[in-house]
Image: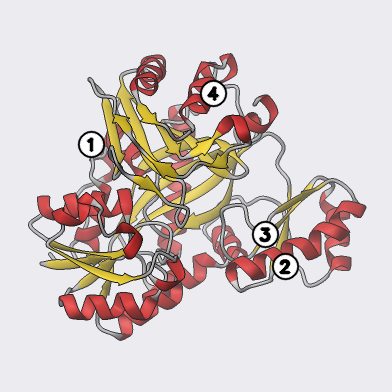
Amino acid sequence: MFSRILIANRGEIALRIIRACHEMGVEAVAVYSEADKDSPYLQLADEAICIGPPSPAESYLNIPRIISAAEIADVEAIHPGYGFLAENINFARICRECGIGFIGPPVEAMELLGDKVQARKLARKAKVRVVPGSEGVVEDESQALKLAAKFGYPVIIKAAAGGGGRGMRVVHNDITLRSAFDTARAEAEAAFGDRNVYLEKFIAEPRHVEVQVLADRTGNAVHFYERDCTIQRRHQKMIEESPCPVLDEREREEIAEAAVRIIKEAKYVNAATVEFLLDRDKKFYFIEVNTRIQVEHPVTEMVTSHDLIKWQLKVASGQKIRISQRNIKHAGVAIECRINAEDPRNNFAPCPGTITRYIPPGGPGVRVDTHVHQGWTVATNYDSMISKLIVHQKTRAEAITTMKRALREFVIEPIKTTIPACLDILSHNLFVKSQIDTGFVERHF
C-alpha cells in the first residue's frame, strides 16, 4: 500500500479521498488554489500546497504545477478524483514518465476508451450491443446525410472525445443535420481539442444505466452492480439510484456481465463506469466508459457496503482484488441528489455567494458528502455542485420518503440551490412509478 499520495482536486471529492487515506494509514497531501485557501478540509490533510490563482487553468488544470507539488511533497502517487485532470491522458502519461503512480487506469486503456469510436469497436469485439451508428469518424456532411438516411431519423451527432453533452446534437431531418454537423464539430474542438464526430441512431425515450466495475493488474475484474442515472438536465445528471428499478435479476446480471467483458477486453485497471442506454423494451446498448471514479459513487457504496476509493488505492498500489463476484452483495435502495448552487426557477442560473446559514440533514440512512459550511463562499470559478445528499433504505418507496424528508431539512441560505427541483422531481407521480426517461426533466419541468 502507498504511504503518501497527492490529491489533484478540490472540494468534496478531495475531502472524501483524505478520509479514505487516513482510514488506511496513508498520508494525504492536498493542493489548493488561492480561492480555496481557507477551506477547512485542508487542515485535515497531512500537507497542503498552493498551486496558483483561482482560475482552473492556472491551478487544478496546470499539470506542471501539480507535478511540482507532487515532487516537493515526495508522494508515491496522485489521485485525480473526478473532473479536472481525471481523464486527461497527457497527465496520466506525464505521471508515469516522472515515476509517480496514477490512481486510475493505464494510459493505453485511457487512450482506447477515451475515443468513443474505438470504444464502440472494442464493445463489438466483446460481443456487447452498441447503438447502430457509423463505423468510425464521420468525415463530412455528405457522409452524415447518407448515414442518417440509412439509420433513419432522429440521429445524434457525438464528439469522438470527451463527454458531458458537449459536441452532441440530436437532429430530425436533413436541414437540421447540415447546420448541426459543423456546430457539433466546432464545439467538440473547443471543448476537447478534437473536432472528430461520429453518428448514431437516436434511441427514443431511453433510460441511462451504468455499471460500476473494478479491475486489477492480473486481469481480474468484478462489478458492483448498476446505477440508474436517467434523471438528467441537458445531459447532466441530477438524481441517481441503485438498483435500476425496471431491471429484473436476470437483466441486471446480463448488463453487469457485459460491462465486465468490455473492461477485460480493454485490459483496464482500477475503477471504471460502463454506461448504457436502455430502450423501451429493456434492450441495453453500450455508449461509453468513464475512466475515473464517478460523482455518484456513494450510491454504489451504500448498497454494496464497499468503499470504492479504498479499492482504488489498493488496486493502484498493486494489490489483487481478493473478493469473488458472488460475495459482492446488493442490499436495499440508495438514491443520490446533487445539490448545486443554481436557481431552478431561473433556468438553473448559477447562484454564487456566501452561505450564511447551513444546516445539513441527518437521521437513519442519510449521508451528506460536502466540503461547504456556514460562511463558505461559492465562487464562480468552479462547478456549481456544493453537496451530495445520499439516502439508503430497504425499499425504493422508503428511500424516496427519506430523501424528501432530508431535502426539506437541508438549509442552505441565502443562495438558491437545486433542492426545490429535486423535491419536485421526487414528488412527481411518474418518478414514483419509475416511468421516466432521459428527457423527463425537460418535458415535465
Category of crowding for the residue at label 1, using alpha-carbon neighbours closer than 10 angstroms: few (below 14), some (14–19), many (at least 20): some
Compared across the picture, whether 399 is left or right of 290 comes to left
Residue occupied by mark 4: 425
Say whether marks 2 and 4 touch (CB < 8 Å): no
Count of marks placed on residues: 4
Say whether marks 3 and 2 touch (CB < 8 Å): no
Q: Which amino acid does label 1 sit on?
A: Ser
**Disc sitting over residue 167 in the figure:** 3
Name the N-terminal-most of marks 4 and 1.
1
Name the N-terminal-most of marks 3 and 1.
3
Q: How far apart are marks 3 and 1 (CA)?
A: 37 Å
Name the N-terminal-most of marks 3 and 2.
3
Task: Mark 2 vs mark 1: give the one in front.
Answer: 2
Q: What residue type is labelled 4?
A: Ile
Q: Which amino acid does label 2 sit on?
A: Ala
Question: Which of 224/191 is in front?
Answer: 191
* Above or below, 438 relative to 86: above
Q: Distance between the residues labelled 2 and 4?
A: 34 Å
Residue occupied by mark 1: 305
Q: Distance between the residues labelled 3 and 2?
A: 8 Å
Disc 1 is placed on an element classified as: loop
